[in-house]
Amino acid sequence: MRLASLLLMLFLAMLPGCDPARHPSRPKALLIGLDGVQLEQYLLLGDATNLKQRLYYGKAYAGGINGKASEQPTLSGPGWVTLLTGVWSNKHGVDSDTESLRVDPAFPSLFKRLRLAMPNAYLSSVVGWSPLNTAFLLEDAHGADVRESGLSDARVIERTLQILANTPADFTFIQLDAADQVGHDSGFGDHYQQALRTLDSQIGHLLDKVDERRRLHPQEDWLVIVSTDHGRDYWGKGHGSASEQEKSIFIASNKPLNQELTELSIPAEMPGPNNLYGLPAQTSVAPTVLRHMGLTLQPEWLLDGTPLLGKTGARKARADEHKGRLRWNSNATGYLTILKNGQVVAQVPARDGQWTDPQGMERQNDYVLVLDGTPTAVRNRPAAKAFVIEESSY
């Protein structure tokens, strides 16, 4: 009898669902967008902030690479859409704050990708700056369960806490606008610091709610990312141009992130001001969320960003149009596969760090570099085409 009981217990333990340790985790993601927050100003609040005490964070850059096809204005429309799609505006098409613009359906946002992959997922977008929902992502995110726009920061936080408490909350994006408005009104100074202090407290409330959910639902695997759409100019009042300060942003997370955030990887021939382009790009946020949510990143998605969780693949993929050459950074010992416009064209040692297209780059091409199962894309600008970004600040 005792032997029979032991055998029954062993049998039950082997059944799917009978061992709690074997339950698949349920990924959840909360993306907190802080409009126009300068990291250096945030750090002036000291060591007792939620940013420093509860998150892993690092510098990053917005606005693409100056003088290359990825360059875009450091404005809210291009910045937020880049964060949510994982591609620069030369792909997603939102290259200004003009409200008639819509994201290119070929490069959908997290809302559409997650809806297609997870038809029953609970998706929310709660924002202060209305055009995110009412213009740029109007069609793209129409399938979201919650879309609310034009809310005060206090109301955004209130609604987010309700969503986290009362719904499945599979993916939630929020945008907090007050600090950006204070910056436009008064620049850096006491008012801006107070706005950041309020933001940090609000982040703390959200992290508390996530921790509460994790205690109540231990199978949930939560990723929280905090980032911003752009930096600010020297005075803190404007943005939109291509200065180092306006391009400087940050990415923070409740999870430790990989070496793309923690270790500089500098493109030798174009390091950028103070090695800016050795930092992760704004495009890294979307592939990080997609990977956390269980989606396999696909080469045909043409994502420009390096995911900050798991394998990085080839880092700092870029095109040298005049030499017809792709470049990347990697210390991997394996081989890298190169696709051009959807077709495999080469396999080269990852450590080579470069490959010359025998057909040159006189025309626009979409290249994808696949290493360790991780794709990263780059679209070249035709070699003969000049590129000038409009200098506009807001």
Image (cartoon, grey):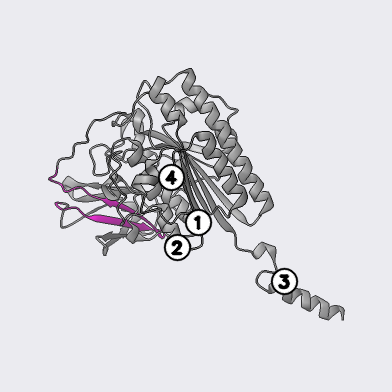
Q: Are marks 1 and 4 in contact (CB under 8 Å)?
A: no
Confirm whether residue 38 shows in the render: no
SS for callout 1: loop
Residue range corresponding to the magenta coloring: 362-385
- Where residue 191 appears, x then y in whole percent? 48, 20
Type of amino acid under label 1: Met
Instruction: State which quadrant residue 96 falls in.
Output: top left
Which residue was labeled with disc 2? Answer: 117
Which residue was labeled with disc 1? Answer: 293
Q: Earlier in the sequence, mark 1 or mark 4?
A: 4
- Relative to 208, say whether 368 is above or below: below
Between marks 3 and 2, how big is the CA–CA gap?
A: 31 Å
Between marks 4 and 3, how big is the CA–CA gap?
A: 40 Å
SS for callout 3: helix
Q: Earlier in the sequence, mark 1 or mark 3?
A: 3
Instruction: State which quadrant residue 187 falls in.
Output: top left
Which residue was labeled with disc 4? Answer: 260
